[in-house]
Amino acid sequence: MRRVVVVGLGPGDPGLVSLATREAIDAVPAALRFVRTCRHPSAHLVAGAASFDGRYEAGATLEEVYRGIVATLLDAARAGESVVTGHGAVAGSGEVLYAVPGSPLVAERTVELLRAEGPRCGVSVVVLPALSFLDLAWARLGVDPVAAGVRLVDGHRFATEAAGVTGPLLVGQCDRRLVLSDIKLAVEQEDGEPGPVVFLQRLGLPDEAVTEVAWSDLDRSVEADHLTSLWIPQLAPPVAGEVARLVELMRELRARCPWDRAQSHASLRRHLLEESYEVLEAIDELPAGEGWEHLEEELGDLLFQVVFHAQLAGEEGRFGFSDVARGIHDKLVARHPHLFAGDVQADSSDESWEQRKLREKGRTSVVDGVPLSLPALARAEKLQRRAVTLGLDLPDAGAAWSALEGELAGLREAVAASGAGGAGAGSGTEPEVAALVGGVLFGVVDLARKLDVDAEAALRCAAGRFARRVAAAERLAAAAGVAQDTLAALPPAELDAVWQAAGATGPAMRAT
């Protein structure tokens, strides 16, 4: 006889375990008894049973854990002699007992797999009915699940199982704060957040708790455990399946892909920078009426980097993607008191924004917090904008022109005095000349800001035009029979003619 007898240990209270279950336990030798987990108030009824708790710590994913459990049970049922389970060797008589929390037929993935795999392996699977947490939940909530049209959802698969559902929902297996955060993240709030929800914890036990909380406190006010469920009476908006699916995919990649598993915050730095610049490149294409699909793609790549870093932080118990989303939401609300507080007049100036940031961050200077890693032009512009809040700024573009001309004049004098403009310039340029070049560039940034031009983007576009013109010159020279490696040897007049012709090949070239 090869079979696995599956019994349920009920919602928690040992007094709720059925007589049939107790008799089934007694009918199987202790050495052939298994419990999915010892973390259940009635697990002690299965005396001498081997627990699969260790597999949860060793497995990369829950699915891997569940399939490992099923394989062990089927091996034990088929064995005619001792079988090593990872919990010691047990004698094989052909019949094993497997006890699970609650009911074997409610939210029990291992039983689903057993019933599918058992017959293929020549092992029958007998499932005894048991009381589940659902029966106590309906009693505590005062809800008829049939009349109300309740849908049961697994908290670990909420994003996909609840997609498009508006409620009511009873969400089981809410065993961790991270699961609650994912549930919260999965629900769009464009039309306002859902109403209060109810936590059902340790039903039928002396420390049973039924607690109503606001949706905003879903992942804050209750300490989740393996006997926690969530009642959501109504979800007005649909579930945000796409964002949640991305977060879920990120978890799977971290569990199964060697490259993703090997990454850290530090190793991802260059990828984050590259994706940011690729977004900027896509934005630069937009004025020509093109690039919308490119921008969509690059924004997705950048979002993936954000999700990746949030996943790494979540694995360390620091924060998750929902915390990131909530944090920026709350920050933006706090930074716009004229819109949300009702007691501050609207002020779109940089001053109010920067002063609020100073108070929030506890900084002593407006230039604190400007990243050193920013590109030089972008950092210069950001520093200038911070200084504006203190009144430290030239009054207009005319004054910026005059200041820039002064910087250029000073640079010319220094170059003439040092000889830095000679044939050997670059290797021994004096520090004063380098500082004055920096002053000229800083003045150009100031003038660009006065003219409402993004200096970093403008220089990037100019560099792009220059690159295209160089490539065009190479093509023209090649068409005229001049090899690339001999182009520099052309007489100056011929080389200039090639350059001018390259500049006339299209509107994008003429600006340089």
Image (cartoon, helix red, strand yellow):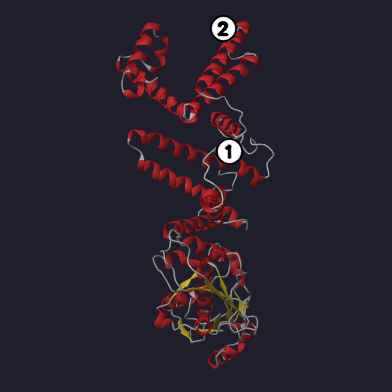
> In the picture, residue 470 is in which quadrant?
top left
Does the image show residue 392?
yes
Amino acid type at image mark 1: Glu
Q: Is residue 456 left or right of residue 312?
A: left
Q: Residue 351 bears which disc, if any?
A: 1
Q: Please, is residue 57 above or below residue 11 in the view? A: above
Residue 443, percent from left and from top: 55, 22
> In the picture, residue 419 is in which quadrant?
top right
Residue 179, percent from left and from top: 54, 65
Tag 1 secondary structure? helix
Tag 2 secondary structure? loop
Q: Dot 2 corresponds to which residue?
A: 422
Give the residue drawn at x 53%, y 21%: 400
Q: Please, is residue 183 above or below residue 460 in the view? A: below
Which quarter of the rendered picture does the C terminus lie within? top left
Does the image show residue 95?
no
For discs 2 and 1, the disc positioned in front in the rendered view? 1
Question: 46 or 194: nearer the eye?
Answer: 194
Question: 28 or 300: nearer the eye?
Answer: 300
